[in-house]
Image (cartoon, rainbow, N blue to C red):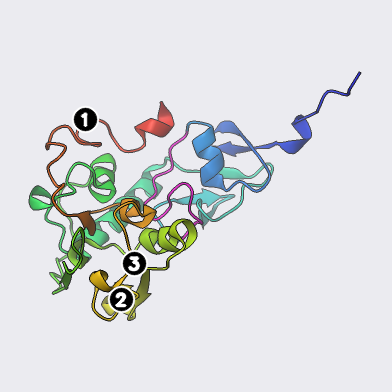
C-alpha cells in the first residue's frame, strides 16, 4: 500500500485582517490573499506576469510596516493589515495622483467601463481629485494598422512591457525618459508600425487603462454593459 501524500507540511498560515489565511511556499501575500477570496487592490500586478511593484496600490502593513503585497512573499505567522481606513485612503490618493498626472477623460475614453484605474477610483470612493491637474502634452501613436498607443492614459504600470517580454517573447514595449518625462516606448524608431506586435499579443490585452487600444473595437461592447459598469473591481476575487 502506498503512503498517502501529506500536503500539510507544504502550507502555512498567516493572519490577514484578522482572518487566518493558508499560503504555499513561494506565494506572495497578494497571491495567498486572492486564493483565500480576499481582495487586495492592485494595478500594476497582473496574474501570469512577474510582479512589478510599481504602483504601490497593493501596499499592506506587515507586522506594522508597509510592504508591497505583490512582491513580498508570504511567511508563516506574519500579521497583515489590508482593508483599513488608512491604507484605503493612501490608495485613493495614489489613484488620484495617477488621474491628475495624465489626461484621463473618462466620459470620452474608449476604455471607460473596462478601465481598472477608473474602477479603482469607484471602489476607493474617489469623487474629484484634490490635486491639481498637470494636463501634460503627450504623443499618440496611431501608426499601426490595428493598434494604437494613447500615452495620455498611460499609468506606467509596465504590464505591456512584461507581457510582451514574458508571454509574447518580443519586448515590443519598454520605458524611456525619467521622472515626469518617463513614458512607454516601443522598439522601433518609426513607432508601433515598425514593431512586430500583433492583435493577438498578450501585451495588447495587458493594458489596464485606455493606453493601448485596438482600432475599431471601442464600442463592440456598449457602455453600460462593460466589465465594471455593474460589478466592482475585485468582486471576482471575493465571489
In the displayed orientation, state which residue is furthest to the right.
1
Circle 1: element type: loop
Would residue 173 appear left or right of 23 to someone viewing this image?
left
Residue holding disc 2: 182
- Mark 2: few, some, or many residues within 10 Å (few <14, many ≥20)? few
Instruction: Specify the quadrant that holds the C terminus.
Output: top left
The residue at the point 41 percent across, 61 percent down is 164
Residue 230 badge: 1
Q: Is residue 42 magenta?
A: yes
Q: Secondary structure at mark 3?
A: loop
Residue at image location 26% in from the left, 61% down from the top: 98
Q: Which residues are magenta?
A: 38-52
3D distance between C-alphas at marks 3 and 1:
36 Å
Q: Is residue 55 visible?
A: no
Q: Position of residue 208 (x, y in %)?
A: 30, 52
**The magenta stretch spans residue 172:** no
Sequence-wise, the earlier of marks 3 and 2 is 2
Quarter location, residue 237: top left
The quarter of the image holding the N terminus is top right
Q: Secondary structure at mark 2?
A: loop
Residues at marks 3 and 2, CA–CA distance in whole angstroms: 23 Å
Amino acid at each position: 500500500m502506498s503512503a498517502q501524500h501529506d500536503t500539510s507540511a507544504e502550507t502555512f498560515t498567516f493572519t490577514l485582517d484578522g482572518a487566518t489565511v493558508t499560503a504555499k511556499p513561494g506565494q506572495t501575500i497578494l497571491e495567498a490573499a486572492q486564493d483565500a477570496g480576499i481582495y487586495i487592490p492592485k494595478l500594476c500586478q497582473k496574474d501570469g506576469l512577474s510582479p512589478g511593484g510599481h504602483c504601490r496600490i497593493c501596499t499592506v502593513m506587515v507586522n506594522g510596516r508597509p510592504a508591497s503585497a505583490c512582491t513580498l512573499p508570504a511567511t508563516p505567522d506574519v500579521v497583515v493589515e489590508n482593508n483599513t481606513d488608512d491604507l484605503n485612503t493612501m490608495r485613493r490618493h495614489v489613484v488620484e495622483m495617477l488621474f491628475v498626472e495624465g489626461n484621463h477623460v473618462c466620459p470620452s475614453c474608449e476604455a471607460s467601463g473596462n478601465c481598472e484605474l477608473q474602477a479603482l477610483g469607484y471602489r476607493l470612493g474617489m469623487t474629484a481629485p484634490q490635486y491639481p491637474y498637470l494636463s501634460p502634452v503627450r504623443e499618440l501613436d496611431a501608426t499601426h494598422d490595428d493598434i494604437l498607443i494613447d500615452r495620455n492614459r498611460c499609468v506606467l504600470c509596465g504590464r505591456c512591457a512584461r507581457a510582451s517580454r514574458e508571454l509574447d517573447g518580443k519586448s515590443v514595449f519598454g520605458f524611456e525618459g525619467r521622472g515626469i518625462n518617463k513614458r512607454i516606448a516601443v522598439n522601433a524608431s518609426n513607432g508601433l508600425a515598425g514593431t512586430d506586435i500583433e492583435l493577438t499579443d498578450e501585451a495588447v490585452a495587458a493594458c489596464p487603462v485606455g493606453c493601448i487600444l485596438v482600432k475599431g473595437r471601442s464600442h463592440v461592447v456598449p457602455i453600460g454593459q462593460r466589465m465594471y459598469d455593474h460589478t466592482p473591481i475585485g468582486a471576482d476575487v471575493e465571489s
